[in-house]
Amino acid sequence: MTLISSAPAGYDQYRENIPRGVMEIIDYPSTTVGNSRKAMVYTPPQYSSTNAYPVLYLLHGIGGDEAEWHNHGSPQIILDNLCSDNLLEPMIVVFPNGRAMVNDRAEGDLFAPEKIQAFERFESDLLHDLIPYIESNYPAHTSRDKRAIAGLSMGGGQSLNIGLGNLDHFAWVGAFSAAPNTRTPEVLVPDPSEATSLLSLLWLSCGDQDNLINISLGVHQYLTQHGVPHIWHEESGGHDWPVWKNDLYLLSQRLFK
Ligand code: FER
């Protein structure tokens, strides 16, 4: 399926007098890395610990860390506005640090082999450390149909690798401008009929000026050939924040519905 749309003007602008969510920084113990790791967590407007919320894990790119979305993507404004317009299922959004190593800051040679490897290691940190922490410290639903994973570029590749590789954990998977860490389509989706029956949403998007677009196109073509329902959203733009913010706006309102 192809879908052409973009967010309306003002979608990422702070509005006065609407209920607001809260963005906070957490530390969680990681058995995978062997230390305490940081993440950011957004809880929605009118959040109450007596409710139960679905959770989106939203991942950053190779130049970022757990604060990248917060620093560049105005996610709390976008999500608060969507909530205020009744377009969003209230959800918790977790912004992890996808570089699972002791020094996980985005510094030095970002393409060094051990740093690229740390993006692979994150799968274990997410599944064994962060998700259990979130689900025991927040009023989070714990079933696969209430868990989503999405991300930009390096985090888009991670979302496909981890999400499609663990369909017992995730029913909702999204990749914005997926990077070369993306596994080949045959490895991502070895069993198209299983993926079709388990996925509630598979979202792929990329800017038409992005040098990495062939990676997304390759996955899109494979999915099309094998009859796996998905959304392919090619939009005008490059490897950049206007595209990713638009993608968050469009994807988030489809989740958990
Ligand atoms: C690469 C080009 C880009 C690559 C990763 C990226 C692992 C990631 C870009 C980003 O996250 O913005 O060759 O290899």
Image (spheres, rainbow, N blue to C red):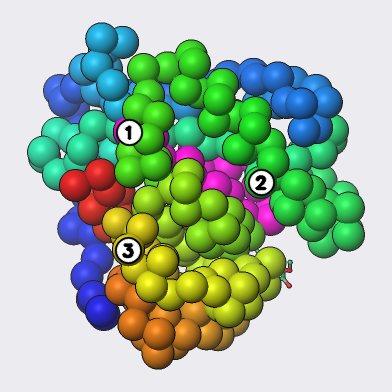
Disc 1 to disc 3, C-alpha distance: 20 Å
Question: What is the total number of numbered labels drawn onto the structure image?
Answer: 3
Q: At x 42% / y 56%, what residue is drawn? A: 173
Counting from the top left corner in percent of width and height, residue 132 is at: 55, 25
Q: Which residues make up the magenta segment?
A: 54-72
Which of the numbered marks, if any, corresponds to residue 231? none
Mark 3 element type = helix
What residue do we see at 35% from left, 76% from top? 228
**Amino acid type, label 3:** Ser
The kind of residue on which mark 2 rests is Glu
Vertical comparison of 199 with 25: above or below: below
The CB of the residue at mark 3 lies under 8 Å from ligand 1:
no
Q: How busy is the neighbourhood of tag 3: few (under 14 within 10 Å), some, or many (20 plus)? A: few
The quarter in which the N terminus is drawn is bottom left
The amino acid sitting under disc 1 is Pro
Ligand 1 image position (quadrant)? bottom right
Residue 152 visible to the viewer? no
Residue located beneath label 3 in the image: 197
Pointer 3 or 2: first along the chain? 2
Residue that badge 1 annotates: 54
What's the distance in space between the residues labelled 3 and 2, CA to CA? 23 Å
Q: Which residue bears the numbered disc 2?
A: 123
* Residue 100 x %, y %: 75, 40
Say if 150 sits above or below 38 in the image.
below
Q: Nearer the viewer, residue 59 or 138?
A: 138
Asked if the magenta segment contains residue 158, the reply would be: no
- Tell me if I can see residue 180 in this picture: yes
**Would you say the residues marked 2 and 1 are in contact, meaning their CB atoms lie under 8 Å apart?**
no
